[in-house]
Amino acid sequence: MTAPTVFVVDDEGGFRSSLTRLFRSAGLPVKDFASPAEFLSEYDASAPGCLVLDFAMPGLDGVELQRLLRDELDCDLPVVFLTGKAEVPDSVAALKQGALEFLTKPAEPEVILTAVRDALVRNEECRRESAELAELRKRMDELTPREREVFEHVVTGQRSKQIARDLGTAEKTIRIHRGQVMKKMQADSVATLVRIAERLGI
Amino acid sequence: MDLNPINWLNVLWGVVGGILLTLATMSLVLATRKQERFSRGHLLLAVLAVASAGNAAFEMLMANAGTPDQFGALLRAAHIPVSILVIATPWFVVLMFRAGRPWLAILANVLWGTAAAINFTLPHSRLYREITHLERVPLLGGAEFTWVSGTTHPAAYLGYLGVFATLVFVVDAAISLWRRDERRRAIIVGACLGTSLAIGLFHSILVESGALRSPYLVSLGFLIIMVAMASELIRAASSAPALERKVQVQQAEVAHLSKTTMLGQVSGGIAHELSQPLNAILNNAESAISFLDRDPPDLTEVRDALAEIAEQDRHACEVVGGFARLVRQGDRKSELVDVNGVVGEVLELAQKDLDRMGIAVSVEPDPGNPRVRGDPVLVAVIVFNLIRNAIEAMSSGEAAERSLTLATRGGDRDVEVVVTDRGPGIPETDRERVFDPFFTTREGGSGLGLAVSRTLAELYGGRIVATAGPDGRGTSMRLSLPSA
């Protein structure tokens, strides 16, 4: 997996170059693009990082790009908008769409850097969350249908005896299944199992 | 001739003549005043006053004439000053009041002129084939005057007709002044001039037909006319500078308002234009510091950052420079304006908006470098307004329809700047209305842009017209200004 990269999209050459340099000076890997189209043609959906967008660009504008990305990616690339004029309706729309930040130029370099660092952290957390969930789902898939049933009952807080009665089998069988579930799900206690269940939305 | 100078009649003519000559002198002085707008009027008045004085002199001489031949000769000669007065009066009205029908004046002139011409060929003037009778008539107070009678010559009637036509002219002029709501002038022209002419005519007819024994006192009537005309002239001469100054002040205010409005609008654009390079400079500066703080410092990056700072600064200077050029030139009010140059500068200012809207621009300057006389800032205001309107018109349209053409065309009389867009166009019924103040089809639009632009254009003797674009689509705004 590549290091988290800052993706800069801005049609104004001089400004784009200065932004890129700023991120470089802060030790952040950066890639810049002159237009949303250019970005889309080169961007790999699996690349981590965040997006710094100029709000008003000819052609596809920032908000539309944001919407496009959201539809394609499971975990959105966090977006930091930079705009020359502070238009309140535009900023509200962008934030509603899930932009992380909406900054007006001129913006202090420190402010931009802070926003970008936050975005990168967010992206990092989001990816980690995603990866963990994927792992958990994989483990779930390992369960047999019976084990799956037992799992669902265990996390409601039922005792083995009750589960045995509900499912019409012996308590001992249930205990064996429960052990398997704990092992496959790599949980060390019922409490952990419950948390796993919550995360998976069961 | 038996002149008894001290009798009151002669004194009366002396007084009348004196007043008239004083008036003539005053008018001459006023006529020669520097920057006097009415010098022609004053000059004319002086001539007329002198003629009236001359007429008074003749009247006095006639009243003291001893023989019919003397009288006749004096009467004939008196036609000189009288002709000057009768012929010039209608033209004075035309010149000073801009009223009255010129054809009527010409007719009156021709009638009188013919009669006067005939007069000079006759020994006893146009009025008498022959003066057959002369008597001295006594008056109260010890005065006496000569009174004659004789056979009437037909040319007398021609002369009366001429004076009557002049009277008709004057009355007609007075009526039109009244209708134009210039009541005071109507009264002066109608009452003073008209009445004096009427009474003079009537009096002459009575005397010359033998019905009335009286000396000629037409000069009194002329005195009234002269005083009326002089008062009008003086009034006009003293109020004109004030009026003119008022108009100049108002024009300057409109120009100033438009300039500040435009500068305000442009400043918004300038601020936007400047914030980009300033921002970039800030980012680069901070970056350079960070690179320097590294161990070891990354000097290549620092150098690049500084080079870019220099470039951004230059760009910012250009933006400011263009603006400053425009503003500096605006301090002088009337100069030769390079139309192509102004169009170019305005285009630069509007470039960001044009790019943002994706509008393709084509410029067709006249290679002959047309020039107009005026204030380049105000010309820029007008062109800027027209461009903004074009941008607005195309804002809702298709991308393919977003093209703007700026053309300049120089000519002998006019220079034209044409701003053409391919927007929805203006319906024919609205093509004049768009120039009305507060007419706008745009939400949040003030509706003043085109109205102000048109006022400014007219200030310089030009105009703006909206027409359909070249193939019937879109709109062409045509600004024309007088060629310098």
Image (cartoon, coloured by chain):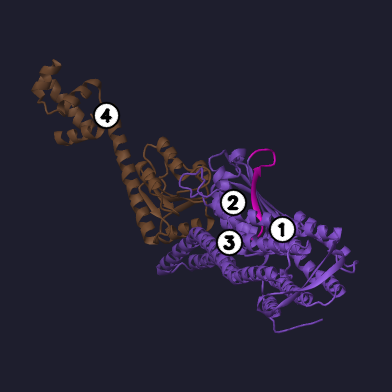
Chain colours: A brown, B purple
Q: As displayed, is residue B17 above or below residue B298? A: below
| Residue on which the image places disc 1 | B167
Residue B124 position in % (x across, y down): 87, 68
Residue B472 position in % (x across, y down): 67, 38
Residue at 59% across, 51% down: B387
Look at discs 1 and 3 and give the one toward the viewer: 1
| Residue on which the image places disc 2 | B387
Q: Which residues are magenta?
A: B460-473
The type of residue carrying mark 3 is: Arg
- Give the mark, 1 or 3, whose residue is nearer the N terminus: 1
Q: Mark 4: few, some, or many residues within 10 Å (few <14, many ≥20)?
A: some
Q: Is residue B229 or residue A118 the one in the foreground? A: B229
Mark 3–mark 4 distance (CA, rounded to whole Å)? 108 Å
| Residue on which the image places disc 4 | A140
**Residues at discs 3 and 4 in contact (Cβ within 8 Å):** no
Look at discs 2 and 4 and give the one toward the viewer: 2
Mark 1–mark 3 distance (CA, rounded to whole Å)? 19 Å
Mark 2–mark 3 distance (CA, rounded to whole Å)? 49 Å
- Give the quarter of the image for residue B394: top right
| Residue on which the image places disc 3 | B184
The type of residue carrying mark 4 is: Met
Q: Is residue B143 or residue B368 the one in the foreground? A: B143
